[in-house]
Image (tube, rainbow, N blue to C red):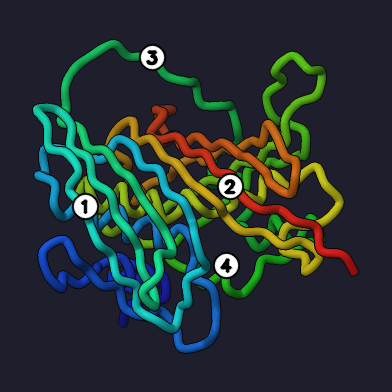
Amino acid sequence: MDNPSSLAVAALGDLLTIERLDTDLYRAPASDTEPGRVFGGQVVAQALRAAAHSVEDARQCHSLHAYFLRAGDVRKPIIYRTLRDYDGGSFTHRRVVAIQDGRPILNLASSFHRAEPGFAHAQTMPQLPAPDDCPDLATALAAMGQAISSGSLVKLAAFDVRVAPEVSGSGEDHGGGDALPAQHYWIRLASPMQADPALQRVLLAYISDFALLRTTSLPHPTQFFSPRLQAASLDHAMWFHTDPDVDDWLLYTMDSPWAGHARGYARGALFDRKGTLVASATQEGLIRPVEG
């Protein structure tokens, strides 16, 4: 009998497998029967998969930029329309529109590049405890007097998440005298999927939306999952520097250099266990205090 982790990973694989309806037109089925908002990482990941279906295997996504326009409904399918903007000698560009009820809920632009050599340098991975020395997500949040929403637990069921030491204001100091709010997570699939490079990027896009916006709330008195805070992703960008391996541990380090005007901005870097910078992410989101 399959264990719960294997079942959750298989369910995630099904969720990210979109149905081809016609040339450059795809559909993802409803993901739940109860009312709820579609996880932003799901829409970005499915849109990236729709884009990749029209790109040759020798070219992998190196960057994506997405705007969240409307909240998606988990009870309804999502239609993905791919636009083939450009096919060049080295780069391929695709746009994808995610649609529900005839209205766009997300616009995604993505670029694919054939592998080629060039100059190289990379950010160094911070020195943090290994995943085996870090508590799981629920335990870490409980120790801080916080809880994770049941909806978030469902979205993360296919992943093993460990929390490295987190202190608000523990990020990099850029000369202003105060360090940035930061948090650090070790993440991997709860059961190996052995996905191809294109699907690995889709999986990484899915998980990259998790906790990034929460970083912007760390220095402030209202907890991220509090009903006194209205939070939603506005836009999301990623750069894939090399082929990721989501079957193994990845360190997701996040900081937030700015928040204001009911918006917060966060940056993330993903490293493999060898210290290689695998991908980078940025996000701006709504963090609006709710009165009363």
The residue depicted at 74 percent of the width and 31 percent of the height is 170
On the rendered structure, is 290 left or right of 14?
right
Q: Say whether marks 4 and 2 touch (CB < 8 Å).
A: no
Secondary structure of residue under mark 1: strand
For the residue marked with disc 1, what is the amino acid?
A: Leu
Instruction: Decide if residue 185 is in sight here.
Output: yes
Q: Which mark is residue 212?
A: 2
| First along the sequence among labels 3 and 4 | 3
For the residue marked with disc 2, what is the amino acid?
A: Leu
Secondary structure of residue under mark 2: loop
Q: Which mark is residue 83?
A: 1
Q: Say whether marks 3 and 4 touch (CB < 8 Å).
A: no
For the residue marked with disc 3, what is the amino acid?
A: His
- Looking at the picture, how far across and down is residue 47, in whole percent? 32, 57
Marks 3 and 4 sit apart, C-alpha to C-alpha, by 35 Å
For the residue marked with disc 4, what is the amino acid?
A: Ser
For disc 4, the marked residue is 152
Query: Compared to 247, does 226 lie above or below?
Result: below
Marks 1 and 4 sit apart, C-alpha to C-alpha, by 32 Å
For disc 3, the marked residue is 121
Quarter of the image that includes the N terminus: bottom left
Query: Compared to 285, does 18 lie above or below?
Result: below
Q: Say whether marks 3 and 2 touch (CB < 8 Å).
A: no
Q: Toward the viewer: 101 or 150?
A: 101
